[in-house]
Image (cartoon, rainbow, N blue to C red):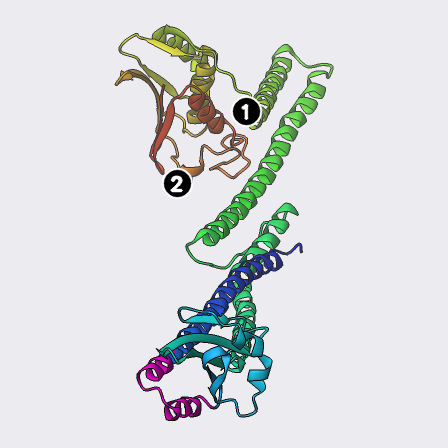
Amino acid sequence: MNRISIKLAAYFFISVLIMETSLIFYLHQNIIHARIDEEYSRLLADGSNHRDVLEDHYSDMTLKHIALMEIGEREVVITGSQGIIASSSDENNSIIQQYSSLLNDLDLDEDRILVSDWKESAYIISAHPYKVDSGHSGYVVMFQSTRSIEQLVSKLNLHFGLAGGASGIALFIIYAILSKFLTRPLIRMKEATEKLSQGEFDVSLPFVGNDELGELSRSIQKLASDLERLKTERNEFLASISHELSTPLTYLIGYSKVAMRQGLNTDERQHYLTIIAEESDRMKDLVKNLLDLAKMDETTFTVSKESFWIRPFIEDLHRLVGPSYKLKKLRLDLLCNEDFQIHADPLRLEQIVLNLLDNAYKYSEEDTNITLEVYKDEGKSVISVTDVGIGIPPEDIGFIFEKLYRVEKSRSRTSGGSGIGLAIVKELVEAHGGSIQVESSLGKGSTFTVKI
């Protein structure tokens, strides 16, 4: 029983079977007892009527009439003084012979059921004492055949058996319906998850409603889409890293050999060494980003907060990146009108700001301005970086902080990023308990705002 449909059917069938059996047994017994009680009551009532008639109009004719009235399914025996049979509807005297000891031993003051076991006896028997005068007294003894009760029980058994069988068939029909509408979607979801575990992310699940099964189906579908996108982005990232590493390596090897040639003058050799240094820095930054990505996957970012003044901190960063901005003919404007203390990790905050400045640097054209602004707003420290670069397409804004996501899909060494920097920024900002937002217009530039 490894299939959920079989388990569901078994549990459902057993539960309903127990409930149905209990209900049928309860109804069966109650109907039988009600019918037997009805026979007892009617037998006592008829016997009491005969006794009343006999006491009011005692005569041989009355005795004979009472006997004639009870020929058939019911018999009557009227005894007189000292147990003598005064009248009987039993023409063959078989009942009198069979129950002679019972008739002779009667000693009652009121109406009573003498034999009530309808299963073991052929009759249920009631006795009704009567007294006309000192010379005429005795008992009216009623014999009710149990055949009608047995026939009723047989019919009840048949009908309840048919009802039980029909219920069993209905249960199997219900199981078939449940298997179609409940278990089949689950089986398809199971098959979909097996495909996902094997790396096949192109799965399609049908719409199964807005209930829990529908939510599960949509969650699996979303998971498949996310995994497929992640796989695509990771492959693009690995291809990009391979390309980015191979390019500086080619430069390093090629210009190293050129720089070692004999006969080069000092200026030429210095030019080649400068290229080697630039490509070495590029490789260093790329490896650093890869290490940061590994830390993000392992959630090993640590933040050690302390209080420090923001203006000296920002001015140091401004001086640090200024030369590289000038080389690209970019102007970095610093707006910090007030000095205040900020509670943060200075090393991580430096990483945040440098990543944002580097991002603005990559996507800005020559002879444009980039603004680094710091201010206090509602008790929070705000750092914003604004450029007038190429901007971000609206459809990409929701994904730029995801790992490995790159708006610029090209592998240009001048504009293509690795898709790590902004993801690192978001992780570090959230580690500080802060938030980051972006506003961008395609072709007009972007503004990244950090609140800590």
How packed mark 1 is, by other alpha carbons closer than 10 Å (few <14, some 14-19, many 20 or more), is few
Q: Is residue 146 magenta?
A: no
Residue 333 x/y as whole percent: 33, 17
- Is 302 above or below relative to 182? above
Q: Is residue 295 left or right of residue 373?
A: right
How packed mark 2 is, by other alpha carbons closer than 10 Å (few <14, some 14-19, many 20 or more), is few
Residue 85 x/y as whole percent: 49, 85
Quarter of the image where one finds residue 350: top left
Dominant SS of magenta comes to helix
Q: Is residue 64 magenta?
A: yes
Q: Is residue 349 left or right of residue 103?
A: left
Q: For mark 1, what is the residue?
A: 299
Query: Dot 1: what SS?
Result: loop
Q: Quadrant of the C terminus?
A: top left
- Is 405 above or below relative to 421? below
Q: Front-most of 74 and 355?
A: 74
Q: Front-most of 337 and 175?
A: 175
Spatial CA span between label 1 and label 2: 30 Å
Q: Quadrant of the N terminus?
A: bottom right
- The amino acid marked with disc number 1 is Thr
Please name which of the two marks, 1 or 2, marks the residue nearer to the observer: 1
Q: For mark 2, what is the residue?
A: 393
Query: Dot 2: what SS?
Result: loop
- Is 137 above or below relative to 341? below
Residue 37 x/y as whole percent: 43, 71
The numbered mark, 1 or 2, whose residue comes first in the sequence reads 1
- The amino acid marked with disc number 2 is Pro
Q: Is residue 376 visible?
A: yes
Q: Front-most of 327 and 63?
A: 63
Residue 43 x/y as whole percent: 42, 77
Task: Read off the magenta span.
Answer: 48-71
